[in-house]
Amino acid sequence: MRLQQPIWPRFLPSHVVLALARLGPLGRRLPAPGTWGSVAGLLYFTVFFHPLGVIATLLLSAVACYLAVALCGEAEFRLGRKDPGEVILDEFVVMPLCFLGWRALVGPWPAWVVFLTGFALFRFFDILKPLGIRRLQDLPGGWGVVVDDVAAALASCAVMHLAKLGWLHFAP
């Protein structure tokens, strides 16, 4: 199967594509733009996904990831650079995936601990790209921009759920 970049963003003006891919001024004006995109993603999770279950989160995230693939890939093309740091829509849209099974995670720990842990783990996996995540960047166009972040978010989620299981099993 060959992944192709969606063509519909080609018809959008550059200023629209770049503003969406950069999350307005966040990607361009602040230091560590990926971190700020992730912080915005925490707000996105809190406002839209917090009350949802796993299936709804997966479905809405799939739609958001498709839009991010299209827009980030087009922004990459227009900027003439592979996965430019200022393009942060990818970090933003995947943050809800860090918290799949939120209700189960918040049982043994306060919500703020889970929130900060998910954020920190995501940044760890997004920056260092271990476990083969780095190879996902080689996918064409926006797929390479977004899919490595999806993997980082899912790895963060898995680590938190494994930590919860360990906590419940070994805690006094």
Image (cartoon, helix red, strand yellow):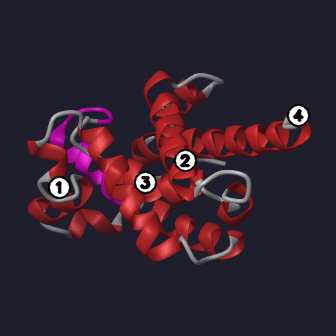
Residue 27's disc is none
The CA span between labels 4 and 1 is 48 Å
Give left or right: position of 42 versus 3.
left
Q: Badge 1 is on which residue? A: 18
The CA span between labels 2 and 3 is 38 Å
Q: Badge 4 is on which residue? A: 170
Asked if the residues shown at circle 4 and circle 3 are in contact, with their CB atoms under 8 angstroms apart, the answer is no
**Element at label 1:** helix
Q: Badge 2 is on which residue? A: 113
In the rendered image, residue 15, in percent from the top left (x then y), is placed at 9, 61
Whether 72 is drawn above or below 32: the answer is: below
**Element at label 4:** helix
Mark closest to the chain's N terminus, 1 or 3 = 3
Mark closest to the chain's N terminus, 2 or 1 = 1
The CA span between labels 1 and 3 is 16 Å
- Give the magenta-colored segment's residue range: 70-83
Residue 5's disc is 3
Task: Determine the residue positioned at 66% across, 51% down.
Answer: 109
In the rendered image, residue 144, in percent from the top left (x then y), is placed at 46, 40
* Number of numbered discs visible in the structure rendering: 4
Judge the density around disc 4: few (<14), some (14-19), many (≥20) Cα neighbours within 10 Å: few
- 2 or 3: mark nearer the eye: 2
Which residue lies most toward the right here? Answer: 169
